[in-house]
Image: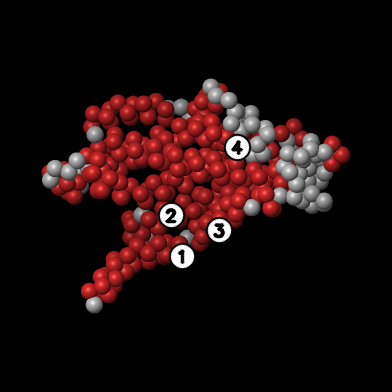
Amino acid sequence: MAAAAASISAARSASPTVARFKDALRRHPTAIFGAVVLLAMIAIALAAPWLGTVDPQAMSPVRRLRDPWGEYWFGTDMLGRDVYSRVIYGARVSLTVGIAVAILSTLVGLAIGLVTGFVRWADAIVMRVMDGLMSIPSVLLAIALMALTRASLENVVFAITVSEIPRVVRLVRSLVLGLREQPFVEAATAAGTGVARTLVRHILPNTVAPLLVQGTYIFASAMITEAILSFIGAGTPLNIPSWGNIMAEARSLFQLKPWLILIPGAFLSLTVLAVNLLGDGLRDALDPRLARRM
């Protein structure tokens, strides 16, 4: 009986959160659309070796600039490479960069933001560095960092991550500044709880929901930044098919063969739109203030 009562109590305590989440998704079907499209893009990226018709780097002068919807679904580029296969494999690059940057910048920014928001002497030092980084547009900062390194996927992830960390730090710091004045944090401090334990046990759980929403926006921003870097020649190497590289190589043929840019651009736009719609749905579902207001 005690176990049954405990399970019923747990279910009742969890049901408002679950119900609020379901209601938010029901009110925002666009979030479901975004999640479905994003999952479809991830499935396409994972199944690229099976979905791709030929090697994305295979060149053939005899099949240069074929129009789409014929033998080659998306046509061929100026080197005779299959655009369909290159776009499918390009999804791997964009999604890898987006996911990696979102995870890394969130983890690093969370650690720095927790410390700067709770430890007053560290706040004055670290935040001046973050303000300096934020004064530089993220794309320009990423370009400057890529200019100091060689072109590779790892360096692209590093450059974009550095440009996104200050925004996460400011978000976490603002949350911690409000939470550290709450009675439960003051009680833990008065009871002699250490700084690390207070941060992990009392403050960290209250930052998860905003960070999930922020992570989706970083995900979308990182994919756009990677495409910009690749388009101007400062991103991934040309031997790695990415949506930015595909559009960059076809820019001189835009007036003659516009589909060489429009097709990968459509995939990039649709993926970014899906991530942003999912982020809006998560924000409405996880923010209790919005739920009460609606």
Disc 2 target residue: 282
Q: Hey, what amino acid is under mark 4? A: Ala
How far apart marks 1 and 3 lie (CA) works out to 15 Å
Q: Between disc 1 and disc 4, whose residue precedes?
A: 1
User: Disc 4 vs disc 2: Cβ atoms closer than 8 Å?
Assistant: no
Q: Look at the numbered disc 3 and give the secondary structure of its residue.
A: helix
Give the foreground label among 1 and 4: 4
Disc 4 target residue: 227
Q: Between disc 4 and disc 3, whose residue precedes?
A: 3
Badge 2: residue crowd in 10 Å (few <14, some 14–19, many ≥20)? many
Disc 3 target residue: 36
Q: Residue at x 50, y 31 (%)?
A: 159
**How far across and down, in percent of the image, does residue 32 sit?**
51, 60
In this view of the protein, which residue sits in the foreground, 50 or 127? 50
User: Disc 1 vs disc 4: Cβ atoms closer than 8 Å?
Assistant: no
Q: Is 26 displayed left or right of 156 in the figure?
A: left
Please identify the residue farthest to the bottom as the structure is shown.
Answer: 1
Q: Hey, what amino acid is under mark 3? A: Val
**How far across and down, in percent of the image, does residue 267 sit?**
64, 47
Q: Look at the numbered disc 4 and give the secondary structure of its residue.
A: helix
Q: Is 182 displayed left or right of 258 in the figure?
A: left
**How far across and down, in percent of the image, does residue 153 sit?**
57, 34
Disc 1 target residue: 26
